[in-house]
Amino acid sequence: MTEVPVICIDGPSGAGKGTIAHMLAEKLGWHLLDSGSLYRVTAFACQHDGVGLEDENKVAEVARHLDVRFEQAPSGEVLVYYRDVDASRAIRTEEGGRGASTVGAMPSVREALLQRQRDFAEPPGLVADGRDMGTVVFPDAPLKFFLTASAEERAQRRYKQLIDKGESVSLPRLLRDIEERDERDSSRSVSPLLPADDAIVIDSTATPIDAVFAKVMADVTTRFGT
């Protein structure tokens, strides 16, 4: 599919894959694909344009013509723009996550965004963060990881993030949302959330992020000699 080296990092929300993907891309000097942002922006675009998420045909049409761009701020934060509207904060809310899960379960939407994701594979290499990077988008990638953690631990992490931002949030509600999203993502008919057969599975429930990164880097070094 591509001669550009690709490292896939898949897993459920809150398992730490986004953090690891950013750390790895920075360490290697490779490009980064946050595929979840594309689904979140699709849901945001539908809301922005008055398209109901229950209409798969219209949602897929939005995805096919998605006017989105990514910019890196001086702080290192990746800013996401839809039609020059800064959607960065809106797409990273709990509502944004639920919207992404809803549109991500639509086969025609996933098909519409497939090639756009593959286009991110450019020299010197790509770190792809998502839920089906290793199973569907880059099935021939030479190195794949699947990061996981218990729903309770992921809810605690998200709770701390939101509290640190000064937001009022319910831990039981967060846990319920995570469990419901896991169920949707794992049971959908197209590209269900599961490890690729050749993925290295890492459970980060009781493992500090630095230790997870050290494990990932060890496997990267073994595979690529980096």
Image (cartoon, rainbow, N blue to C red):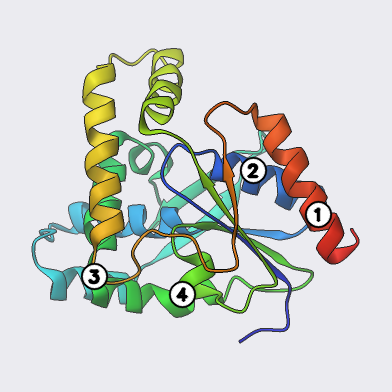
Label 2 to label 1: alpha-carbon separation: 12 Å
Provide the residue designation for mark 4.
Answer: 136
Q: Percent from the top left, x then y, of residue 114? A: 43, 76
Mark 3 Cα-neighbour bin, 10 Å: few <14, some 14–19, many ≥20: few
Q: Nearer the viewer, residue 128 or 190?
A: 190
Q: Earlier in the sequence, mark 2 or mark 1?
A: 2
Please state which amino acid type lies under the numbered disc 1.
Leu
Tag nearer the camera, 2 or 3:
3
How many angstroms separate mark 3 from mark 1 (CA)?
35 Å
Q: Is residue 44 visible?
A: no
Residue 57: quarter of image? bottom left
| Residue at (35% x, 58% y) in the render | 39
- The disc labelled 2 sits on which kind of residue? Ile
Tell me which corner region of the image, top left, top right, bottom left or bottom right, holds residue 83: bottom left
Closer-to-camera residue (186/100)? 186
Q: Which residue is mark 1?
A: 28
Q: Please, what secondary structure does the residue beneath circle 4 have?
A: helix
Disc 3 is placed on an element classified as: loop
Q: Residue at x 55, y 45 (%)?
A: 17
Comparing 6 with 53, the one in front is 6
Left or right: residue 39 versus residue 203 is left
Give the residue number, with chain letter if any, for mark 3: 189
Q: Which mark is residue 20?
A: 2
First in sequence: mark 4 vs mark 1: 1
